[in-house]
Image: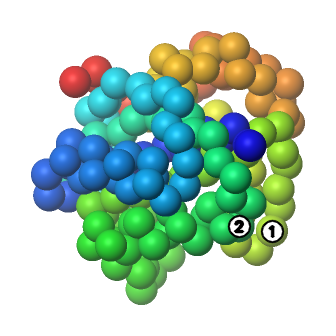
Amino acid sequence: MSKVYLSLGSNLGDKQRNLSVAISEIEQRCGKVELCSSFYSTPPWGFNSNNEFVNLALSITTTLEPLDLLNVLKHIEQVSGRQQKAKSGYEDRPLDIDILFYDNSIINSETLTVPHPRLHLRLFVLVPMNEIAPQLIHPIFHKTIETLLMECNDSTQICKI
């Protein structure tokens, strides 16, 4: 069994419902949901939109290998209505799921980078992660989530729902 941390976000449609359905799908298809953070309202990061995000963090235990897990998560995104991007960059979406950590692994492939390469820059990831795993140590930076949160320069407003 592997312990995995995920970040989920939605900024289209019934956002909280999108995330709740995704959590159920993850539990059915990927593995046991061990911890789930609160829901957080956050502004878009990296692009302009009038649609606020709802974000959360999950920890799961899974028997799926990293790339198999990624494929299942991408399928869950597509079933939720997420379209394949025609352009590079960020855009509105009903569901976004990112693998933040997979055990203590460091993975650099064409399709997957773990730990997520920008998690330390994003309050919308760090605040929910700090709620469920403040003492988790980043395998590259060798710092806890709590420390990464304190050092983060992101100034966006994050509100617990």
Q: Which is more foreground, mark 2 or mark 1?
A: 2
Residue that badge 2 annotates = 67
Query: Given the current orientation, which residue lies at the most extreme left position?
Result: 14
Residue that badge 1 annotates = 109
Residue at mark 2 to residue at mark 1: CA–CA distance: 9 Å
Circles 2 and 1: CB distance less than 8 Å?
yes
Quarter occupied by the N terminus: top right
Quarter occupied by the C terminus: top left
Query: Given the current orientation, which residue lies at the most extreme bottom position?
Result: 86
Q: Secondary structure at mark 2?
A: helix
Q: Does 36 sit above or below residue 71?
A: above
Image coordinates of residue 62 in percent, x first then y, are 65, 48
**In the figure, is residue 55 to the left or right of 62?**
left
**In the figure, is residue 87 to the left or right of 153?**
left
The residue nearer to you, when weighing 76 against 57, is 76
**Which disc is residue 29 wearing?**
none
Residue 57 visible here: yes
What residue is shown at x 28% (from left), y 52% (from top)? 21
Image coordinates of residue 110 in percent, x first then y, are 76, 74
Q: What's the amino acid at mark 2?
A: Leu
Q: Does 94 sit above or below residue 146?
A: below
- Quarter of image, res 71: bottom right
Image coordinates of residue 55 in percent, x first then y, are 36, 39
Q: What's the amino acid at mark 1?
A: Ser
What residue is shown at x 69% (from left), y 14% (from top)? 135
Disc 1 residue crowd, few under 14, some 14–19, many 20+, Cα 10 Å: few
Q: Secondary structure at mark 1?
A: loop
Image coordinates of residue 104 in percent, x first then y, are 82, 37
**In the figure, is residue 84 to the left or right of 98?**
left
